[in-house]
Amino acid sequence: MATEHRLTATASPGGLLFTCEDDLCGRRLVIDRQTGEMTVIDHGDRAALHSGSIGGVVLATPDVT
């Protein structure tokens, strides 16, 4: 069973930076405010489920086919 990690967000003019709170993970990703495009900077623990939100933005489990 995968562990669940929480992401905290920092808002900036360039986008929203989400960082994993687990010090051993290191996952970081950016959401572009204009397009909604997500860019993963550091994958961190690929087996962990990551969740977090800011305002009206909610990250959900992706549908991978």
Image (cartoon, rainbow, N blue to C red):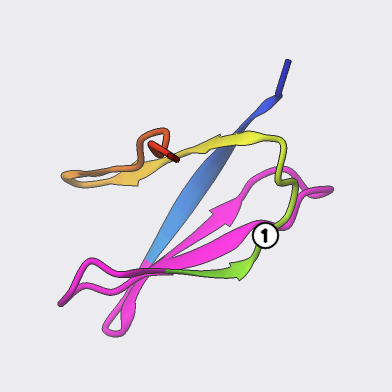
In the image, residue 5 sits, relative to residue 19, either above or below, namely above
Question: Whole-percent x and y of residue 16?
Answer: 35, 67
What residue does disc 1 label? 43
Instruction: Kindly identify the residue that appears in the image at 62 percent across and 49 percent down.
Output: 20
Instruction: Kindly identify the residue that appears in the image at 73 percent across and 57 percent down.
Output: 26
Quadrant in the picture for residue 65: top left
Quadrant in the picture for residue 60: top left
Q: Tell me the quadrant of the picture where the N terminus can be found.
A: top right
**Which residue is most to the front?**
65
Mark 1 nearby-residue class (10 Å; few <14, some 14–19, many ≥20): few
In the image, 46: left or right of 28?
A: right
On whether residue 46 falls in the magenta region, the answer is: no
Question: Whole-percent x and y of residue 49?
Answer: 59, 32
On whether residue 14 falls in the magenta region, the answer is: yes
Give the residues drawn in magenta, as a range: 11-38
Quadrant in the picture for residue 13: bottom left
Question: Whole-percent x and y of residue 41?
Answer: 59, 73
Disc tally is 1
Instruction: Kindly identify the residue that appears in the image at 52 percent across and 45 percent down.
Output: 7
**Which residue is most to the right?**
24
In the image, residue 54 sits, relative to residue 29, either above or below, namely above
Instruction: Kindly identify the residue that appears in the image at 77 percent across and 49 percent down.
Output: 25
**Which residue is most to the top?**
1
Q: Is mark 1 on a helix, strand or loop?
A: loop
In the image, 8: left or right of 44?
A: left
Amino acid at pointer 1: His
Question: Whole-percent x and y of residue 34?
Answer: 15, 77
In the image, residue 50 sits, relative to residue 16, either above or below, namely above
